[in-house]
Amino acid sequence: MKDICIFKRVEKKYRISLAKRDALLSAIGKYLIPDAHGKSTVCSLYLDTPDHLLIRNSITAVSYKEKLRLRSYGIPHEDTKVFLELKKKYKGVVYKRRVSMSLAEAEQYLYGGVTTEDSQIMREIDYAMQFYRHPKPAMMIACEREAYYVTDLPNLRLTFDTAIRYREYGLTMGDGLTSSHGADGTKIISDDTVLLEIKTDGAMPLWLSRALSELEIYPSSFSKYGTAYLQTLTQKGEQYHACNS
């Protein structure tokens, strides 16, 4: 049976130093439990149109953004479970639909439009794929992640991402994630930087708010795909042009 998930939550991001990450974990560690993936290499293959319409829309948009991606925890093989995701953000609230399948099944869908999955979530993803005229893999984003949840608040999650990197080559699933390319890529943050994400469907508990305040950890805007895309333009000597479509 496929894993089908629906998320509706608020996600806040914080760019912090390794020292502040360690201090925060020391302060709140007693509340945290490693989640099912614990420490892992997270690989996300973002889908986009030839003119990068999805990421240009996302960079430009004020209240509504959406992304399509294929995600794995660890470097997948043909029979590894991966997650096909449609992620929307509207007025600060994130809505995520995702369905699991093997990497082989994901390849069949992405490159041939063939799927055996029949669910409301898959139909929503399929509608988005058709709306954008079947976007293809455009960028690979990988990072090293530590993920936690809170014992009595299972919908409160904290993730700490380091070594965030990207690549535009080796993007076919069989020749990219499962080959010598692995999770290789060009870094988009320094070795001393951590991207903390706090994901919750409700208010933040007082002990967490207090720890963030005492350590002077404040929210900041950061998009992995958006940052990587803008970096590629800089490297190519091109300028970003807002999407007018």
Image (cartoon, rainbow, N blue to C red):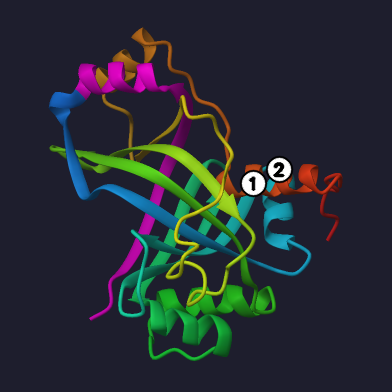
Is 15 or 206 nearer to us in this picture? 15
Residue at 71% over, 69% down = 49
Q: Position of residue 117 (x, y in %)?
A: 38, 86
Indicate which disc residue 236 carries: none
Residue at 47% over, 51% down = 142
Assess whether mark 2 and mark 1 are in contact (beta carbons under 8 angstroms).
Answer: yes
Q: Position of residue 89 (x, y in %)?
A: 54, 50
Q: Disc 2 marks which residue?
A: 231
How far apart, in angstroms, are the residues tagged by discs 1 and 2?
Answer: 5 Å
**Across the whole image, how many numbered discs are drawn on residues?**
2
Q: Which residues are magenta?
A: 1-28
Is 66 or 202 nearer to us in this picture? 66
Residue at 57% over, 51% down = 166
Q: Is residue 43 left or right of residue 207?
A: right
Q: Disc 1 marks which residue?
A: 228
Residue 191, visible in the rendered structure:
yes
Q: Position of residue 11 (x, y in %)?
A: 44, 40
Q: Is residue 67 above or below residue 32?
A: below
Q: Is residue 186 left or right of residue 210?
A: right
Q: Is residue 120 left or right of residue 189?
A: left
